[in-house]
Amino acid sequence: MNGRITPAERVDLAETLWDSGRAEEALATLAGSETVDAQVYALRGEIEFALGRFQEAALSFTALVTAEPDCGDGHYNLGLALLRTAKWEGAASALQRALRLDRNRPDAWAALGVCLLESQMPAEALTAFERSRTHGIAGKAPWAQACLGRATALHLLSRFEEARSAYENLLESDPAHPDVIQNLIALAAAAGDLQALTHYSQRLLALDPHSIAALQGLASVALYHGDFQSLARYCDQIMVLAPGSLEAQHNFSVATERLLAGIRGAGFNGAPFAASPTADPSAAGGK
Amino acid sequence: MAGAVSRTDTFSPDPAGTRASAPIPFRIHVSWNSLITGLMPAPASVNRAETSAVPVADWPTVDWPDAQPAEEPARWAMVVPKMDRDGSGTST
């Protein structure tokens, strides 16, 4: 039946199916033609993206911008699809094309900022997130992303006080934001602020009992106080969640050795915290 | 090479054989996962009157490079915009 309907009719039918939650049928409808047009590419990419098929979505959006080179949304969507498949270089190129067509797109600036964060270019990322905020509207997407991106870039630039202030502003609007709380834990660790480290670690652990960052924060506090029993317990939990954690393995051994040797309350004289911010290796797209 | 420890070796908490290992600090990572997952596609507005059909056989095939390793930032300089201090300008 699909062989004789026009691309526009095909898109209308697919949109109806998509709106009613029948994604696979919508995709099958769009795929049933020998010729397709930009509308087909656009809708197909949108559905594939929603289904988490980011590589396929990237191909559809590539076809869209090939057919319609001035489609800014197409370039932006292509950038996002590539971002989700950790193709930072291709994503940045697509987002720059979107910005050449419309330099005031807050969404494209925010996404470009993510590419730059992932590429360990926090200064450039900060500029991109600032641009996103400049052109965005407070409270509307992607405002929150731009604010978190800005705070994260400041953090990675070791501008800790500005980062802390930005994170705390974000917490006011979203008190349970896991990234924000995790980054406040990292900030507290960098500053050696035990009170904040304990507070934010416990707060994150209450929200997510499997948070490795929260357990690391509490383990750091236990390490500082020479509480080897707690240290061993937190390290054990970290090893269950992240079997490759060398710090947890090592510190678990240290804690059990100290407990067996009967050394209690001796404290730890070295620096229990890593001083410089490190990026989460699991943050690399594709999630 | 005797005594060398490669990065892939099993981690030994006490390579010197002593029983007095010192604790090592935890590295707590900065996270921005929600940035990536929070950005959503824009419904692409395509002018139906102006779009032209393209044969499926002519669809482009693209092979994007994989993500650059963190150790190789230099290649990024080719594609990342050189932005002015005030944030203006996206030309490479």
Image (spheres, coloured by chain):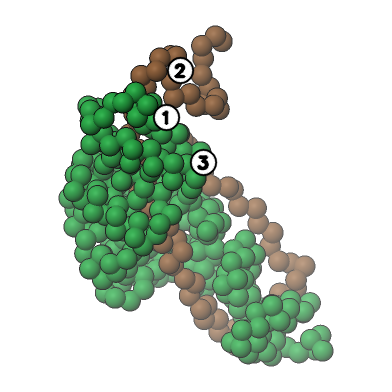
Chain colours: A green, B brown
- Which quadrant holds residue A236? top left
Answer above or below: position of A118 versus B89: above
Residue that badge 3 annotates: A243
Residue B74 percent coordinates (x, y): 45, 38
Mark closest to the chain's N terminus, 3 or 1:
3
Tag 1: Cα neighbours inside 10 Å, few (<14), some, or many (≥20)? many
Q: Are marks 3 and 2 in contact (CB under 8 Å)?
A: no
Residue B47 in view in this figure: yes
Q: Nearer the viewer, mark 2 or mark 1?
A: 1
- Under circle 1, the secondary element is helix
Residue A88 percent coordinates (x, y): 50, 52
The amino acid sitting under disc 2 is Pro
Q: Nearer the viewer, residue B48 or A27?
A: A27
Q: Are marks 3 and 1 in contact (CB under 8 Å)?
A: no
The amino acid sitting under disc 1 is Ser
The amino acid sitting under disc 3 is Pro
Residue B81 percent coordinates (x, y): 39, 52
Residue that badge 1 annotates: A253
Residue that badge 2 annotates: B15
Residue drawn where x is 23% and y is 28% of the image: A266
**Pointer 1 indicates a residue of which chain?**
A
Q: CA distance from mark 3 to mark 2?
A: 20 Å
Residue A19 percent coordinates (x, y): 59, 87
Answer above or below: position of A284 versus A40: above
